[in-house]
């Protein structure tokens, strides 16, 4: 039976008792409104740990002033039963006061330069500071051995890996594969904002990523691939923030060079901002 914990002293007592038994602790941080993508992370964490803690906290500091913090879907009952079915042992459900004891304005912040500055960071100023700030707090609270993050947030994963390496946080970071609907749309809590018409169009994001990969592998120039992707999205009614090919470290690849690549898209469809990515290899 999953245990829901809302007080930090109780969480610490539970985790300390597990550690005394020599158990390895896995952690899956979330903002709730859980779907199959989150549950796959819980199952992944289970494969790497004896006990799994998952947190649900809609973190105010990672939302911009005009973003969807207040309307972000909150579904605590469904989340609890879904986590239990996925094999989670503890649901950590902190209040804002437990997460930010000095208040959000006076909170110590974690900033990871470089990788935080581009793409999502450029379009959502302060977003990754909010993510790193809350994830550091969650890591300190849970004291897990291993934490699982989804690959849909490709840049978030890179920022967290950099933060963990730089701050020497004693935790292993593992990545879960993107979980998609049958039509290719990457699962996201924000998909439910889509109207039926928008939902029918939304899988174009994934199809565009596949087309970008295929064109790159066929030798089309990167600038052409990116411009074609942008146009395909705009023609279908999206407003893209970016549709780009990058190296996994977000540097711009030289034309003609081979190696690991990632196609990344962020685009608004009506009021909903969708992000997705596709990793592939270009023969050298
Ligand atoms: O990916 C998310 O859901 C959030 O950014 C995270 C990692 C739970 C931090 O609030």
Image (spheres, rainbow, N blue to C red):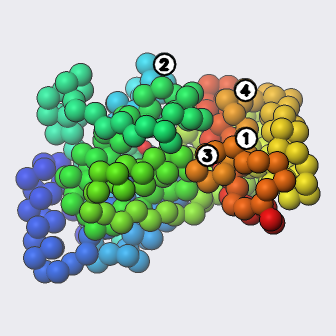
Query: Do residues under tags 1 and 4 come within 8 Å of each other at their CB atoms?
Result: no
Q: Is residue 112 left or right of residue 97?
A: right
Give coordinates of residue 78: x percent, y percent.
40, 52
In three-dimensional space, the C-alpha distance between marks 3 and 2, rounded to whole angstroms, equals 26 Å
Which residue occupies 40% across, 62% down?
173
First in sequence: mark 4 or mark 3?
Answer: 4
Q: Is mark 2 within 8 Å of ligand 1?
A: no
Q: Which residue is mark 1?
A: 244
Quarter of image, res 213: bottom right
Quarter of the N terminus within the rendering: bottom left
Which residue occupies 35% across, 30% down?
61
Q: Which residue is mark 3?
A: 250
Q: Whereabouts is ligand 1, in terms of quadrant?
A: top left
First in sequence: mark 1 or mark 4?
Answer: 4
Give coordinates of residue 187: x percent, y percent.
59, 51
Camera-side mark, 1 or 3: 3
Q: Residues within 10 Å of mark 4 (few under 14, many from 20)?
A: some
Q: Residues within 10 Å of mark 3 (few under 14, many from 20)?
A: some
Query: Do residues under tags 3 and 2 come within 8 Å of each other at their CB atoms?
Result: no
Q: Is mark 4 within 8 Å of ligand 1?
A: no
In three-dimensional space, the C-alpha distance between marks 4 and 3, rounded to whole angstroms, equals 22 Å
Q: Is residue 149 left or right of residue 93?
A: right
Q: Is residue 205 above or below residue 234?
A: below
Which residue occupies 27% across, 63% down?
170
Observer-nearest of 28 and 157: 157
Q: Which residue is mark 4?
A: 239
Q: Which residue is mark 2?
A: 66
Observer-nearest of 57 and 112: 112
First in sequence: mark 2 or mark 1?
Answer: 2
Helix, strand or loop status at disc 2: loop
Query: Do residues under tags 1 and 3 come within 8 Å of each other at their CB atoms?
Result: no
């Amino acid at each position: 039976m999953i245990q829901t914990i809302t007080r930090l002293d109780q969480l610490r007592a539970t985790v300390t008792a597990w550690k005394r038994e020599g158990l390895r602790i896995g952690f899956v941080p979330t903002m709730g409104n859980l779907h199959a993508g989150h549950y796959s992370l819980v199952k992944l964490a289970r494969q790497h740990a004896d006990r799994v803690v998952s947190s649900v906290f809609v973190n105010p500091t990672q939302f911009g002033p005009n973003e969807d913090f207040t309307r972000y879907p909150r579904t605590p009952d469904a989340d609890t039963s879904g986590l239990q079915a996925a094999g989670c042992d503890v649901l950590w459900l902190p209040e804002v006061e437990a997460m930010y004891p000095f208040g959000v304005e006076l909170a110590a912040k974690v900033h990871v330069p470089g990788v935080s500055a581009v793409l999502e960071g450029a379009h959502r100023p302060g977003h990754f500071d909010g993510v790193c700030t809350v994830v550091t707090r969650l890591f300190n609270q849970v004291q897990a051995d291993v934490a699982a993050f989804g690959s849909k947030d490709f840049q978030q994963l890179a920022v967290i890996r950099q933060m963990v390496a730089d701050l020497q946080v004693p935790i292993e970071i593992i990545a879960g594969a993107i979980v998609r609907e049958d039509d290719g749309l990457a699962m996201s809590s924000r998909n439910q904002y889509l109207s039926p018409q928008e939902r029918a169009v939304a899988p174009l994001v994934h199809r565009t990523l596949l087309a970008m990969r295929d064109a790159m592998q066929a030798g089309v120039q990167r600038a052409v691939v990116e411009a074609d992707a942008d146009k395909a999205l705009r023609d279908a009614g999206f407003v893209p923030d970016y549709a780009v090919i990058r190296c996994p470290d977000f540097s711009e690849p030289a034309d003609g060079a081979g190696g690991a690549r990632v196609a990344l898209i962020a685009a608004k469809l009506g009021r909903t901002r969708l992000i997705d990515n596709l990793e592939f290899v270009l023969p050298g």
